[in-house]
Image (tube, rainbow, N blue to C red):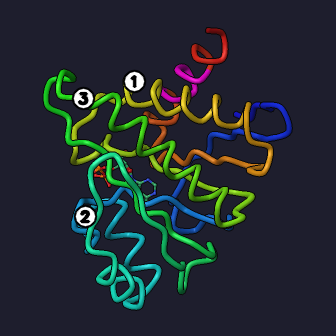
Amino acid sequence: MQVQINESTLELAQGDITREDVDAIVNAANRSLLGGGGVDGAIHRAAGPELLAECRTLNGCETGGAKITRGYKLKARHVIHAVGPVYHDGKRDEPALLANAYRTCLELASQHACASIAFPAISTGVYGYPMEDAARIAFRVIVEYLEQHSEIKLVRYVLYDARAFAVHERVLEQVLSE
Ligand code: ADP
């Protein structure tokens, strides 16, 4: 699924984000920025040990924020390490923190002249964020940003499996019709 937003394209894809040939891929990291499981582990394995070495210099990252590094062995020139919230009950600022993580990634991409960026579904794995709610937040932020910033030409949102892809397709259609 692909939609045009002003001068930019927002695309849903299914697959492994570590293989994406874009200027920046986003990592669903934890506050230590020192690696973890899920997409974080996959990105560190694919990028090689130099990525962890650079991450050690960053002194972690607060929840709702993001920090950028080089991509090392990845095709992507940069990795943007975003820290989404752990989901508790939705009443502990999770929606605002998740929205802030996505927005910070897009701002970092703009600042580092990244014309293309790939996102995973931040917080929807081990961090337990209900997928539909997380997708709605992500797409609202991305669509609003692309409406205001033409320097990012492509946002590819990469879902790991068919079920996640189907949920995101449905939610994106809803968000576009709001
Ligand atoms: P978090 O701790 O933020 O929840 P996870 O890595 O546990 O992060 O999961 C985030 C999402 O990334 C999940 O929906 C998971 O299915 C997905 N995911 C895991 N590995 C990959 C990958 N290689 N490429 C794209 N998405 C992935």
Q: Which amino acid, by three-letter code, is at mark 2?
A: Gly
- Secondary structure under tag 1 reads helix
Q: Which residue is tagged 2?
A: 37
Q: Nearer the viewer, residue 11 or 111?
A: 111
Q: Is residue 167 left or right of residue 21?
A: left
Q: Which residue is tagged 1?
A: 132
The label nearer to you, 3 versus 2, is: 3
Neighbor class of circle 3 (other Cα within 10 Å; few <14, some 14-19, many 20+) is few
- Secondary structure under tag 3 reads loop
Q: Is mark 2 within 8 Å of ligand 1?
A: yes
Q: Is residue 19 left or right of residue 66?
A: right
Q: Between disc 3 and disc 2, whose residue precedes?
A: 2
Q: Quadrant of the N terminus?
A: top right
Image coordinates for residue 29, horizontal then vertical, percent = 32, 60
Characterize the magenta stretch by its predominant secondary structure. Answer: helix
Q: Quadrant of the C terminus?
A: top right
